[in-house]
Every structure is written in C-alpha cells, then in structure tokens.
Image: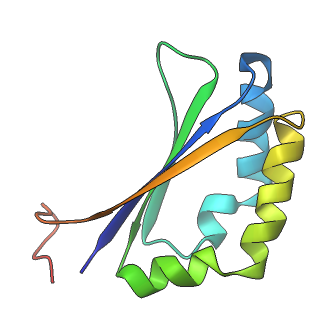
Amino acid sequence: MTVFTILTLHVSPDRRDDLCRYYESARVLELSGAESSQLCLKSNDAGTVIAVATWPDASAYEAWQNAPLRVEFAQGILEAAGGSVTATSEVFQVAIDTRGPCS
C-alpha cells in the first residue's frame, strides 16, 4: 500500500533559506527514493518547513529510514539550520489516490 510521509522541521526563521538551499544542493528529495516529494514552507511561520513524500510501500520508506545517506543528510540539515532543528515525522497509508488505485 502506498505510504505518504510528512517530516516537519522547526528552524530559526533566519535559517530557513539556508535549509532550503541545502535540500536543493544536496538533492535530498531526489536521492531519497520517494516516488514524489516536495519541500514546503509554512505561510504564516517562517521557521516551519515540511518535506512531504509518497512511497510505493512501507518497505521503501523503511529502506530510506535505514539508509546511510539519510544519516549524512540529517547532519547537513542540522548544519544548515545553524545547529538547532526540531523534527517530527508522521506516516500515513494512502486510502484514495487520484492517480490510480491504491493497493
């Protein structure tokens, strides 16, 4: 079954652009293995950034969670955020998808 994840990052508002630049230059989203992913900025809170991703199944997301590259990216995110970042993640199973049937 398709999995949708949300990673919420809280950083100092003055470090948000640095964080976005790191995501882009390191190609974090492209190299994660997700089917699709986006980095989104909260409109009314400059210190909140979310990364959303769609994974083909739970095992694909689990593989990303255990990937050595993810550890490297986490360190880069921390540095880009100036050494202070709070992160929470949520995992959802997709029930209905306009792109086609969910399995």
| Place of residue 38 in the rendered image (x, y in percent of width and height, measured from the top left) | 49, 49
Q: Picture quarter containing residue 46?
A: top right
Identify which residue, 51 or 99, lies in the foreground.
51
Residue at 81 percent of width and 35 percent of height:
81
Residue 25 in the image: above or below residue 45? below
Query: In the picture, which quadrant includes the N terminus?
Result: bottom left
16 on left or right of 102: right
45 on left or right of 54: right
Residue 51 in the image: above or below residue 32? above
Identify which residue, 84 or 44, lies in the foreground.
84
Residue 18 in the image: above or below residue 74? above
Residue 38 in the image: above or below residue 68? above
Residue at 43 percent of width and 64 percent of height:
36
Residue at 47 percent of width and 18 percent of height:
43
| Place of residue 29 in the rendered image (x, y in percent of width and height, measured from the top left) | 60, 60
Colouring style: rainbow
Return the residue found at the far top: 44
| Place of residue 14 in the rendered image (x, y in percent of width and height, measured from the top left) | 78, 17
Residue at 50 percent of width and 53 percent of height:
89
Total residue callouts:
0
Q: Picture quarter containing residue 57?
A: bottom left
Identify which residue, 48 or 32, lies in the foreground.
48
Query: In the picture, which quadrant includes the C terminus?
Result: bottom left
Identify which residue, 6 or 98, lies in the foreground.
6
